[in-house]
Image (cartoon, rainbow, N blue to C red):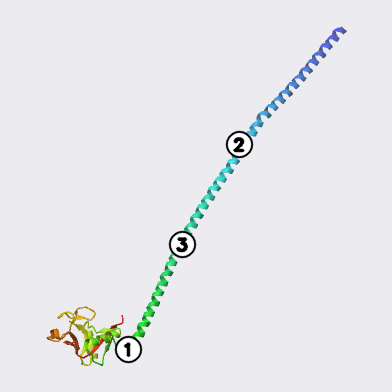
Amino acid sequence: MSEVIYSTVIRTEGRKRDKMEMTVDIYESADSIKDHDFRTDTNTQHPQQQTGSECARNRRLRSVLVCLVVLCVLLLTAVIVLCVLIYTNNHKCHINYKNITQEGDELRAKCNNVTEQNKLLNQTKNELLKYLHEGWKYYEFSLYYFSSKKKSWTESRRYCEEKGADLIIINNKEEQDFVKTISDSENHWIGLSDSDEEGRWTWVDGSTLTYSSWRYHEPDGQRRENCAVSYTSVWYDYSCDSGYKWICEKSIN
């Protein structure tokens, strides 16, 4: 009986020991499985985390590169615009300078012309005063000298030429009336003759008659009378060697 009990106890304890060992083995297996899963998860998730970091880094790099490219484009655009503005301003300045220079040259030329004109006016004024002081008469931009002496037609013309003038050329009735007023009803040589060609009356400047005031039946002297004399309002032909007063004319234009 005691042996039975003893063997029963022995078996019971053996079963308990086996259960405990099985339990320990189960716990150890579970721990090893957990350790393995943890290592496996760790090894699996680490590359994923590492890949995500690299992607984020790459995105940041791309963003930085894009920003740099945009900045470069903006900088290049600004440089181009600045160059265009500088070129445009320089071109405008060059044109303005050229225009100002041209205007300055034109103003200087005008000033020089005005100066020359003033000189000529002063000379003309002085000359006019001189002739008027010597007894010349002014009419329609010309000066006239009525002599008090008598000479031949040729000598009379020579006197006028020495004064920078010539025998008078009467172009219209108004000028003839002026001569009539000053001449005091005396004969005066005028610058008209047909000495070069009989019957072809010309003025001393070579021009032909456009206005005439011949007395009726004049000229009538043919080859003997080749020079013209003005008396009051009419002309006569006389011998060029005859002695008469004369009229000189000098233009002041």
Name the quadrant containing residue 174.
bottom left
Q: Of residues 214 and 8, which is closer to you in this image?
A: 214
Q: Position of residue 111 (x, y in %)?
A: 41, 74
Name the quadrant containing residue 44.
top right
Q: Secondary structure at mark 3?
A: helix
Q: Secondary structure at mark 2?
A: helix
State left or right for residue 71 relative to residue 129. right
Q: Position of residue 227 (x, y in %)?
A: 18, 85
State left or right for residue 208 relative to residue 117. left
Q: What amino acid is found at the position of numbered circle 3 in the picture?
A: His
Question: In the rendering, which numbered label is found on residue 55?
Answer: 2
User: Which image quadrant: the C terminus?
Assistant: bottom left
The residue at the point 38 percent across, 80 percent down is 119
Q: Position of residue 136 (x, y in %)?
A: 30, 88
Q: What amino acid is found at the position of numbered circle 1 in the picture?
A: Leu
Q: What amino acid is found at the position of numbered circle 2 in the picture?
A: Cys
Name the quadrant containing residue 49.
top right
Q: Residue furthest left?
A: 217
Query: Is there a contact, CB below 8 Å, between mark 1 and mark 2?
Result: no
Q: Secondary structure at mark 1?
A: helix
Crowding around mark 1 (Cα neighbors within 10 Å: few <14, some 14 to 19, many 20+) is some
Q: Position of residue 121 (x, y in %)?
A: 36, 81
State left or right for residue 60 relative to residue 126. right
Q: Which residue is mark 3?
A: 94
User: Which image quadrant: the N terminus?
Assistant: top right
Up the image or down, 103 lies above or below 47; here it is below
